[in-house]
Amino acid sequence: MDFAFGPVVLVAALVVVFVAFTFIKLVVRLILLPLLLIKVIVGAVLTLIVGPVLFIVGLILAGVLAAVLFVPLLPFLIVGALVWLLVRANRRPAVA
C-alpha cells in the first residue's frame, strides 16, 4: 500500500497545479480581453486598407510578368503571322 500512495499524491498535486494555472490563465485573459478586441479591430481595419493596395500591386506585377514572358516570343509570333498570311494568300477561294 505504501508504494501506491506516492503516485496518487503526485497526480493530486499535478491536478491542483493544473487547476491553479488554468484559473490564473482565465483571469489574465479576462483582464487582457479589451486589448484582444482592439487588436482584432485594428487588424480588420488594416486589412480593409491594405487589401486593395496589395490587389493593385498584384495586378501590376502580373502585367509586368506577362510582358516579360511575351516580349521574347514576339519574333516567333511575327514569323507565324507571316506564314499564315502567305498560306492564306495562296489558297484558292472556296466555290459558293
Image: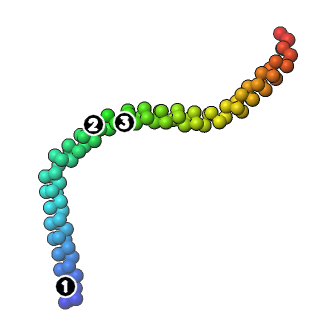
Residue displayed at 16% across by 46% down: 34
**In the rendered view, would you say 89 is above or below 4?**
above
The residue indicated by pointer 1 is 5
Nearest to viewer (mark 1 / mark 3): 3
The residue indicated by pointer 3 is 51
Nearest to viewer (mark 1 / mark 2): 2
- Looking at numbered disc 3 in the image, what kind of residue is underneath it? Gly
Q: Going by the image, does 65 lie left or right of 26?
A: right
Q: Residue furthest top?
A: 96
Residue displayed at 18% across by 62% down: 22
**Percent x, y of residue 53:** 38, 33
- Looking at numbered disc 2 in the image, what kind of residue is underneath it? Val
Residue displayed at 82% across by 23% down: 87
The residue indicated by pointer 2 is 45
Sequence-wise, which precedes: disc 2 or disc 3? 2
Q: Going by the image, does 87 lie left or right of 7?
A: right
CA gap between label 1 and label 3 equals: 61 Å
Nearer to the camera, 62 or 5: 62
Sequence-wise, which precedes: disc 1 or disc 2? 1
